[in-house]
Image (spheres, grey):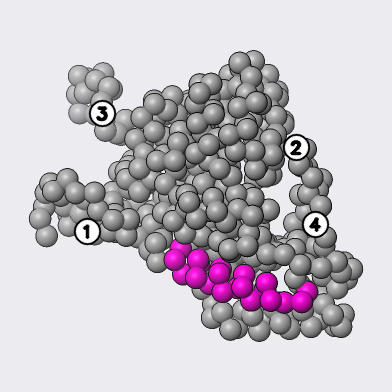
Amino acid sequence: MSKSKPQSGQRRRARTRLVHAGRDPFEQFGFVNTPIYRGSTVLQPTLADLEARHGKRFIYGTLGTPTTEALEKAWSEIAGAAGTVLASSGLAAITVALLTAVKAGDHVLVTDSAYLPTRTFCDVFLARMGVETSYYDPLIGGGIAALMRPNTKAVLVEAPGSQSFEMQDVPAIAEAAHARGACVIMDNTWATPLFFPPHERGVDLAIEAGTKYLSGHSDLLLGLVSANEQWLKPLRQTFNLFAMCAGPDDVFLALRGLRTMDLRLREAERQGFALAEWLKRRPEVSRVLHPGLEDDPGHAIWKRDFLGASGLFSVILKPVPRAALAALLDGLELFGMGYSWGGYESLVIPFDCRSYRTATTWAPEGPALRFSVGLEDIEDLTADLEQGFRRMRTGA
Ligand SMILES: *Cc1c(COP(=O)(O)O)cnc(C)c1O
């Protein structure tokens, strides 16, 4: 293997990039992986070196280490971004993106389908800073132009919403936002850059909760914000002011997860479709919310803009009493009940958007369940649910 970096200048395919991006073994004595650098202090040999901060690769632990640099570089390459910052959680990444784009007196537009803690941050913290938030119908598309005010500085999209799975027309929203000079922020956790290249589709700041598919093993907390050329400098400035940096162990685990992310996502897609199709045929299920299914209202946009679907989707059950729902969920042997998703293990969680939606009405006919399909055999997963539906019918 050549010691020099590839010179061919060829833009390789996503799978190849996942394997090679951000690695420079011969900087690490030939070891394949960049190790965990733990460190606050970075020593400088001379006064002149100490004073010449500008352009220095490493200055202080909060500003980066070889470990964080490896993931930042790799993610930027995969996301088609000018640069990336690594925050301590997905939610921290969302806050740093929003705070990059707004100041007191500004207005932000947030999709009504946004991740609930994003809403809470806007309603509590942005409000305290004097930034007003309005929520909009996720299906608004280019119609968002009518909601833009002179002081609208950011538009936040999430496609699809991670509970309700409405698909958003990101390019149309981005075009309208850019026409008025607003920053387009996307929570791209569901698709990841492998299935939705955010910056190619008009997103300025793209968020990934690395806690989910980048980890793939439910064992770390990490948030990434990638930026296009225009937004990289302000993003870095804001990020450095907070120094909400990710820990070295989590970054190392994320680098490890990165190498197999394409394989895991494609399997999650395959398993997700299989489980969604099975659930669709069940008499207990009223609707499946999965934009990859042909009869889903978001399917046309998904097909146009996305390169795949991950393994997270929801279903609406026909109305059943709470006790019957509990009988279904409490006895499951393979599906765990808990927050987060994107790990190797299957999860299911009930949810209800009714209490917080403001721009749209969430009125499902029965209980809503969100599934994160794992790597178990699909026959075993459907058998577990089959038993659950039997308990739901019989109450035992
Ligand atoms: C989990 C999640 C986040 C937050 O990630 P954390 O690392 O748990 O803070 C953000 N957005 C979406 C869509 C998520 O599912």
Element type at mark 2: loop
Element type at mark 1: loop
| Between discs 4 and 1, the one toward the N terminus | 1
Q: Kindly identify the amino acid type of the residue bearing the numbered disc 4.
A: Pro
Which residue is label 3 attached to? Answer: 56
Label 4 vs label 1, nearer the camera? 4
Work out which quarter of the rendered image holds the C terminus and state it: bottom right
Which residue sits at x=56%, y=43%? 169
Q: Are marks 2 and 3 in contact (CB under 8 Å)?
A: no
Which residue sits at x=50%, y=31%? 175
Element type at mark 3: loop
Which image quadrant for residue 389? Answer: bottom right
**278 inside magenta stretch:** yes
- Residue 364 is tagged as 4
Which residue sits at x=60%, y=49%? 167
Magenta range is 264-284
Which residue is label 1 attached to? Answer: 31
Q: Kindly identify the amino acid type of the residue bearing the numbered disc 1.
A: Phe
Work out which quarter of the rendered image holds the N terminus and state it: bottom left
